[in-house]
Image: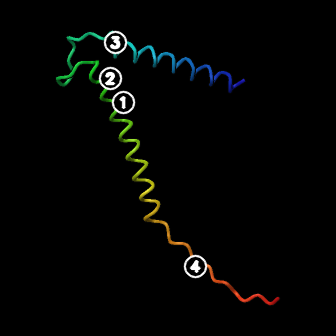
């Protein structure tokens, strides 16, 4: 039962986000400025910046993991008594 409620909430939030983003891109007023840019400009700029930052964070995380992980021990082949 809890999964259905959580799924319904995610669905409703996604639909609300799609409608809101459509409004920001196509129907927002052009005379409202924030830091010299219109709402439509910010609706494009912010998601692009967030996606780029997430990508760069993942690259940095992989780099940190590679740099901080000790190299594997060499495999030594022991003599087998067959």
Dot 1 lies on which element?
helix
Look at the picture and state if 2 lies above or below 53.
above
Residue displayed at 76% across by 87% down = 80
Q: CA distance from mark 4 to mark 1?
A: 45 Å
Colour convention: rainbow
Dot 4 lies on which element?
loop
Which callout, 2 or 3, points at the residue further toward the start of the chain? Answer: 3
Dot 3 lies on which element?
helix
Rate crowding at label 4 as few (under 14), some (14 to 19) or many (20 or more) other CA atoms within 10 Å. Answer: few
Residue displayed at 48% across by 16% down = 16
Tell me if 82 is positioned left or right of 19 in this view.
right
Dot 2 lies on which element?
helix
- The numbered disc on residue 43 is 2
- The numbered disc on residue 26 is 3
Image depth: mark 4 or mark 1 in front: 4
Given residues 17 and 2, the one toward you in this image is 17
Residue displayed at 32% across by 25% down = 44
Q: Position of residue 53 (x, y in %)?
A: 36, 41
Image depth: mark 4 or mark 2 in front: 4
Q: CA distance from mark 4 to mark 3?
A: 60 Å
Rate crowding at label 1 as few (under 14), some (14 to 19) or many (20 or more) other CA atoms within 10 Å. Answer: few
Residue wearing tag 1: 47
- The total of numbered circles placed on residues is 4
Q: Position of residue 21 (x, y in %)?
A: 40, 18
Q: CA distance from mark 2 to mark 3?
A: 10 Å
């Amino acid at each position: 039962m809890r999964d259905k409620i959580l799924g319904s909430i995610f669905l409703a939030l996604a639909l609300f986000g799609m409608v809101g983003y459509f409004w920001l891109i196509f129907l927002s007023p052009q005379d409202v400025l924030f830091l010299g840019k219109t709402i439509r400009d910010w609706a494009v700029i912010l998601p692009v910046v967030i996606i780029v930052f997430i990508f760069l964070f993942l690259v940095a995380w992989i780099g940190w993991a590679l740099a901080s992980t000790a190299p594997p021990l060499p495999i030594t082949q022991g003599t087998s008594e067959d």
